[in-house]
Image: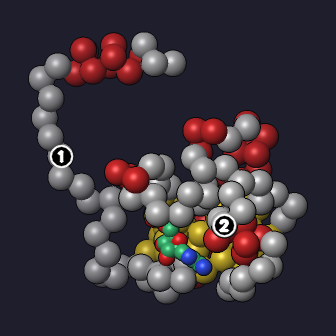
Amino acid sequence: MNDCIFCKIIKQEIPCYKVYEDSDCLAFLDINPMCKGHTVVIPKKHYALITEMEEKDLSSLMNGVQKVAKALMDYGESVNIIQNNGPYAGQVINHVHIHVVPRNKDDGLHLGQWRTTKFENMDEIKEEIKKLF
Ligand code: AMP
Ligand code: ZN
């Protein structure tokens, strides 16, 4: 946690392009943006995974995300909200962060356009997942 780059940003030990802050979260431009205005929103309290977050911290993070998304809806025409958990989901920074990505007509990004697969055993899959709650 001490060497967490996003904790260092919160402590202002390293700089960021801050766009929004409140008592619980911070939003700043992604340093390697996929498009102009690509922003990440982070909780001020360190959590590695969204699944570990306390309800009140998650709730205030999502409030911050919504505020940023509203601003970026005005910056562009649409937004994608993306959150990676774990290495196979593409998580590189182990401090929870939510990407808010402004989108525009013909911007050439292909987020949200995934390859689909047909499963014959949807009932079985549903039961497997229901057991995990
Ligand atoms: P993820 O793949 O979901 O873990 O995304 C981590 C994101 O953090 C990447 O998009 C990086 O470009 C971004 N990032 C890493 N270091 C910084 C930094 N110092 N300031 C802003 N964004 C960063
Ligand atoms: Zn951290």
x, y percentage for residue 25? 76, 61
Give the residue drawn at x 72%, y 75%.
9
- Is 25 placed above or below 37 here? above
- 87 or 34, nearer to the observer: 87
As helix, strand or loop, the secondary structure at mark 1 comes to loop
Give the residue drawn at x 22%, y 21%.
122
Of callouts 1 and 2, which one flags the residue occurring earlier in the amino acid sequence?
2
Compared across the picture, whether 21 is left or right of 130 comes to right
- 78 or 131, nearer to the observer: 131
Give the residue drawn at x 32%, y 75%.
109
Residue 63 makes an appearance in the image:
no
Q: Residue furthest front?
A: 2
Indicate the quadrant containing the N terminus: top left, top right, bottom left or bottom right.
bottom right
Q: Which residue is mark 1?
A: 116
| Amino acid marked by disc 1 | Thr
| Pointer 1 local density, CA inside 10 Å: few below 14, some 14–19, many at least 20 | few
| Amino acid marked by disc 2 | Asp
Give the residue drawn at x 61%, y 55%.
96
Q: CA distance from mark 1 to mark 2?
A: 38 Å
Compared across the picture, whether 15 is left or right of 132 comes to right
x, y percentage for residue 16? 69, 83
Question: Tag on residue 3?
Answer: 2
As helix, strand or loop, the secondary structure at mark 2 comes to loop
- Is 71 placed above or below 41 here? below
| Pointer 2 local density, CA inside 10 Å: few below 14, some 14–19, many at least 20 | few
Q: How is the image coloured?
A: secondary structure
Which corner quadrant of the image does residue 100 belong to? bottom right
x, y percentage for residue 75? 58, 81
Which corner quadrant of the image does residue 12 belong to? bottom right
